[in-house]
Amino acid sequence: EVQLMQSGAEVKKPGESLKISCKASGYSFSSYWIGWVRQMPGKGLEWMGIIYPGDSDITYSPSFQGQVTISADKSINTAYLQWSSLKASDTAMYYCARLLPPFDFWGQGTLVTVSS
Amino acid sequence: QSVLTQPPSVSAAPGQKVTISCSGSSSDIGNNFVSWYQQLPGTAPKLLIYGNNKRPSGIPDRFSGSKSGTSATLDITGLQTGDEADYYCGTWDSSLSAGRVFGGGTKLTVL
């Protein structure tokens, strides 16, 4: 059974750094792209970027290029999304999802709250 | 502003049929497969339709998808109260800023 298990909710202050994770199981992690999707409060889905864990090839959405860093560790079947300096506008739910394509399996989401 | 345009909301009575549209361009829907996702309140999105009109295992045939030119449609028949959710279309954008794109989402209310 394919599962994507995301790390827990985070509360951070503006300017702080953060790295959230997405641990995959039930399939060959290195062989499928994994994507990150943002959902701001009360808003729709926004594609942030994708990574191919097999060779760490990454494509960022132009809207998120330079704002976040996507990475993966295939030795532990885990993908990451990180920020070096959070802003209040980063407050959102973040989902990881396996890209078949399409995005066929989704994690449960990680809520990130950035507030002073 | 989403690349793909969906109506913000639709509604219908239980047992009825509803249609949700998704409009794009030649660089996205026009030349790529469309998928649809269902997001029940407080939960993660779930794949409903892929390849324009295919259903993953476990998705009832009350849900169907189609595509024509640069637009796609999700039909839901025999509406149930449990179908109340947000629905998103998605595809690939073949333009210079290539990547995955989603519609703005449509809230379905079952009256």
Image (spheres, rainbow, N blue to C red):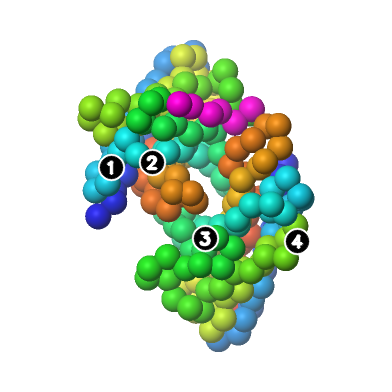
Q: Amino acid at mark 1?
A: Ser
Instruction: Indicate whether B67 appears above or below A56.
Output: below
* Element carrying mark 4: loop
Q: Badge 2 sits on which subunit?
A: A
**Residue linked to disc 3:** B50
Label 4 to label 3: alpha-carbon separation: 16 Å
> Looking at the image, which is closer to me, A53 or A108?
A53
**Residue linked to disc 2:** A32
Label 2 to label 4: alpha-carbon separation: 29 Å
Picture mark count: 4
* Quadrant, the N terminus of chain B: top right
Q: Amino acid at mark 2?
A: Tyr
Q: Are marks 2 and 1 in contact (CB under 8 Å)?
A: yes
Q: Counting other residues with Cα less than 10 Å from the Cα at mark 3, is it few (<14), some (14-19), or many (20 or more)?
A: many
Instruction: Indicate whether A11 appears above or below A29.
Output: above
**Residue linked to disc 4:** B69
Instruction: Indicate whether A90 appears above or below B89.
Output: above
Magenta span: A57-62
**Residue linked to disc 1:** A28
The verdict on a common chain for dots 2 and 1 is yes
Q: Residue at x 72, y 54 (%)?
A: B30
Instruction: Give percent across and percent down for residue A31.
Output: 35, 39
Instruction: Give percent across and percent down for residue A104.
Output: 43, 53
